[in-house]
């Protein structure tokens, strides 16, 4: 069992009967979804799920997990998702897959948000290993980019997988991958990006994570707020 699977299974233990559970996106989240399906089959677990992306929704449906659309809810019991980077104060960098809007909506709506990650994803400051993804309105991307550059950001629009066009999110937005000065305060940067006109959402998740589950060499540690 690899660390991604270990931490996903540990997170699944927090799921109880009757819960409305938010499903994250990515390889670790897929292990979590698969474990919920196993518990449904073998332990008669009764839950309802809501997915943060089309990819997760299709996977959950293929495993016969009951689901509802995000439009039908105002709160959920538990949200579990991975992180691309995390710091010791439980600030997260997410969004390499650019499903930023739904991910942050579910994180905010959850009574409990559990983030899962491998120990190798720990950083001293957000943006240390990856650029910060910032979803922007297509007709405002240049103005938004100029404002982000005034904050010290350097970057450009994310190309699509084939490198023959631009990455377009499920909401029809473009994504600016921006790097900022090292060790910039994540809380302050979060607020500064929020204030830029034309920005739809971004990958800094501060003050949202209730627990961080970290896997290293098959062992999982839990860090609660």
Image: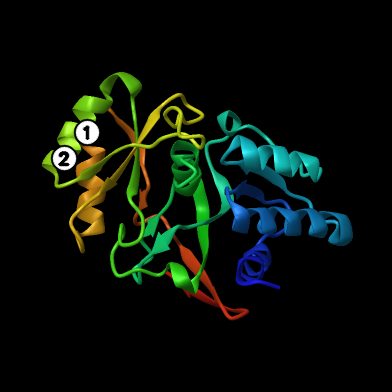
Residue that badge 2 annotates: 149
Residue that badge 1 annotates: 145
Residue in the picture at 73% in, 44% down:
60
Q: Is residue 167 left or right of residue 71?
A: left
Residue in the picture at 48% in, 67% down:
212
Please say if 160 is above or below 113: above
Badge count = 2
Quadrant location, the C terminus: bottom left
Please identify the quarter of the rendering in which residue 198 is found. Answer: top left
Please say if 24 is above or below 216: above
Q: Is residue 67 left or right of residue 195?
A: right
Residue in the picture at 71% in, 37% down:
58
Q: Secondary structure at mark 2?
A: helix
CB under 8 Å between discs 1 and 2? yes
- Mark 1 → mark 2, Cα distance in angstroms: 6 Å
Q: Residues within 10 Å of mark 1 (few under 14, many from 20)?
A: many
Residue furthest toward the left? 150
The answer to whether residue 115 shows anywhere in this view is yes
Residue furthest toward the top? 139
Residue in the picture at 47% in, 58% down:
83
Residue furthest toward the right? 42
Q: Is residue 97 left or right of residue 132?
A: right
- Circle on res. 20: none
Please identify the quarter of the rendering in which residue 196 is found. Answer: top left
Quadrant location, the N terminus: bottom right
- Measured as percent of width and height from the top left, residue 126 is found at 31, 59
Q: Secondary structure at mark 1?
A: helix
- Measured as percent of width and height from the top left, residue 189 is found at 22, 50
Q: Residues within 10 Å of mark 2 (few under 14, many from 20)?
A: some
Q: Is residue 164 left or right of residue 180?
A: right
Please say if 182 is above or below 30: below
Please identify the quarter of the rendering in which residue 168 is found. Answer: top left
């Amino acid at each position: 069992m690899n660390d991604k699977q270990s931490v996903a299974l540990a997170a699944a233990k927090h799921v109880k009967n009757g819960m409305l559970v938010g499903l994250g996106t990515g390889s670790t989240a897929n292990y979590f979804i698969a474990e919920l399906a196993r518990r449904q089959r073998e332990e008669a677990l009764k839950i309802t799920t809501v997915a943060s992306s089309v990819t997760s929704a299709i996977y959950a449906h293929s495993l016969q997990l009951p689901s509802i659309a995000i439009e039908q809810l105002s709160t959920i019991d538990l949200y579990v998702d991975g992180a691309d980077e995390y710091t010791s104060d439980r600030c997260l960098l997410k969004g390499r897959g650019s499903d930023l809007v739904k991910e942050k909506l579910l994180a905010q709506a959850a009574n409990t948000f559990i983030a899962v990650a491998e120990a190798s994803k720990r950083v001293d400051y957000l943006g240390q290993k990856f650029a910060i993804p910032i979803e922007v309105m297509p007709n405002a991307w240049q103005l938004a980019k100029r404002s982000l550059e005034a904050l010290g950001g350097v970057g450009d629009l994310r190309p699509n997988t084939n490198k023959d066009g631009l990455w377009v999110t499920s909401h029809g937005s473009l994504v600016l991958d921006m790097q900022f000065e090292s060790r910039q305060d994540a809380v302050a940067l979060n607020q500064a990006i929020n204030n830029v006109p034309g920005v739809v959402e971004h990958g800094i998740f501060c003050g949202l994570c209730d627990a961080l589950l970290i896997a290293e060499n098959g062992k999982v540690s839990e860090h609660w707020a």
